[in-house]
Image (cartoon, helix red, strand yellow):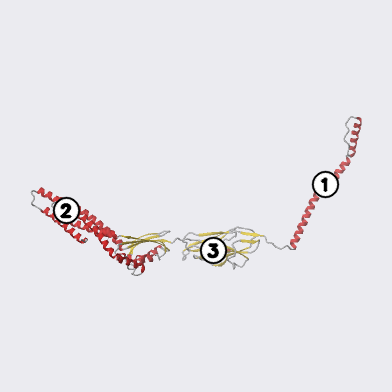
Amino acid sequence: MTTRTKRSNHRKLRGFFLALVLLLTACSGLSSSEDAADTATDAVEDAAEVVETSESDDFAMEEEAMEEDAMEDSDDGADRQSAADGLGAGGATGADLTPSDLGRDIIFTAEIGVEVDDVAASGAAATDIIADLGGFVFGQSTVGGAEPRSVITFKVAPNRFSEALEALGTIGELRNQSITTDDVTERVVDLTSRIEVAELGVERLRTAMENAPDLEQFAELEGLLLARESDLEVMRGQLRTIRDRVDLATITLTLSQDRIDNSVRLAVTVYGGHDDGVGCPGNSENVNVPEGDPVTLCFEVTNTGDQTLRDLTITDTVLEIGGNDDLLPVFGSLDELAPGQSAMLALEIAPDRASQPRLRVTGIPTDGLTDEAVGPAVSTAAAFQIRVFEAETDPGFRDGFDAAWDLLKGIWVTLTVLVGFLVPLLIFVPIAWILWKATLPARRRLQAKRDEKAEEGTAPPPPPYAG
């Protein structure tokens, strides 16, 4: 027995019960009015029970019907699979084939993030792209300031979903993208069946209300009817929401401003000689020259940022550079440098001592159209060392003369020191000899007295006189 036959028989059975209820409520052959009222009340309760039972049975039958429909659909599953395979193999028109053509209800959603130069202009461009594909803006949230950002929600037909994503990814630099699908076929079938059952229940309750014997039973049936109608509207709303999401894919586009990074680079090179900077850039980064030799310093300034830099200035206190006027222009100009551009300047020096300069270059970022600053000034420094040494040359006449002169000066100094040492000695020796001679008689008399006493035995003999 088919599902449709079961449903028809079930409806006939419920109609039979309903007719029986109406017959009982209309019966006027009862013995008293109280018995009639009781019988009517029982009839109303039986009617409500029958309606509820019928709805449960209908729901069970709908589930059986869904299972049977699924079994019947399996017969043409191979055909649907072949159609799906055609999407990738090119056997079918992939741009026109949609999930509905395969008998499925699928919700498509996507989130895409793009970095752009101008958030406002890119938002307008994205809106035009979706409008050309038959879609529309469903919602938008935009924030300005230093980091502008815009989040736009689009609705587009499922068969234009992939095309819309591809087009939106071209308005800037694609940062992230996620795509999700939700197959809601079973939920749609379930809600549709429940709505049909609820509609039948509502219709029976309305019929029962029309035949209610009194106000009390009428009010009770009305309460049941309101509850059933409320549930029915909720299910209808859910079904409408799902169908709306199935009929139109949702794309959420997030536009963010490209991060602006302003910077500048300063490179220092050197070469020997002075030629007005023609040899720049130099062939070495180390300054190691003989004392007093001419060298040329080359300063290469490059805009490594995202915006145009104006009024770039080089300064250094060690080399006494107070601005660009103290330097020789080689190529380019520091008045304005676009992103990626460079300029070269030179400085000619003849260092006589070692030093450690620390050059600094400073610039103002602009939009490239006006002289007004669009951000804080940028600067960078470059430190290097200047090493100086004495030049080594072959010895000559002057070197020999200087060496001989230095030797003579050494001898003269030595003789002077020796004379200075001998002069006191030459003066002291004669004086000491005269004093020694002058005291000689006295020393002899003293010795003679000592000898006499020694002979007399009154005194020990003196030591022998050596003189």
Q: Nearer the viewer, residue 39 or 212?
A: 39
**Residue 249, x across and y down, in percent:** 33, 63
The image quarter containing residue 289 is: bottom right
Q: Nearer the viewer, mark 1 or mark 2?
A: 2
User: Number of labelled discs?
Assistant: 3
Q: Nearer the viewer, residue 133 or 94?
A: 94
| Quadrant of the drawing holding the N terminus | bottom left
* Label of residue 40 in the image: none
**Residue 395, x across and y down, in percent:** 73, 62
What residue is disc 1 on? 425
Q: Is residue 464 left or right of residue 398?
A: right
What residue is disc 2 on? 47
Q: Amino acid at mark 2?
A: Ala
Q: Earlier in the sequence, mark 3 or mark 1?
A: 3
How many angstroms separate mark 3 from mark 1 (CA)? 78 Å
Q: Amino acid at mark 3?
A: Val
Q: Earlier in the sequence, mark 1 or mark 2?
A: 2
**Residue 328, x across and y down, in percent:** 58, 66
Q: Determine the secondary structure under disc 3.
A: strand
Q: Earlier in the sequence, mark 3 or mark 2?
A: 2
What residue is disc 3 on? 301
For residue 152, say whether it is visible. Answer: no
Q: Residues within 10 Å of mark 2 (few under 14, many from 20)?
A: many
Q: Could you tell me which residue is drawn at 28 percent across and 64 percent down?
A: 75
Above or below residue 50? Residue 264 is below
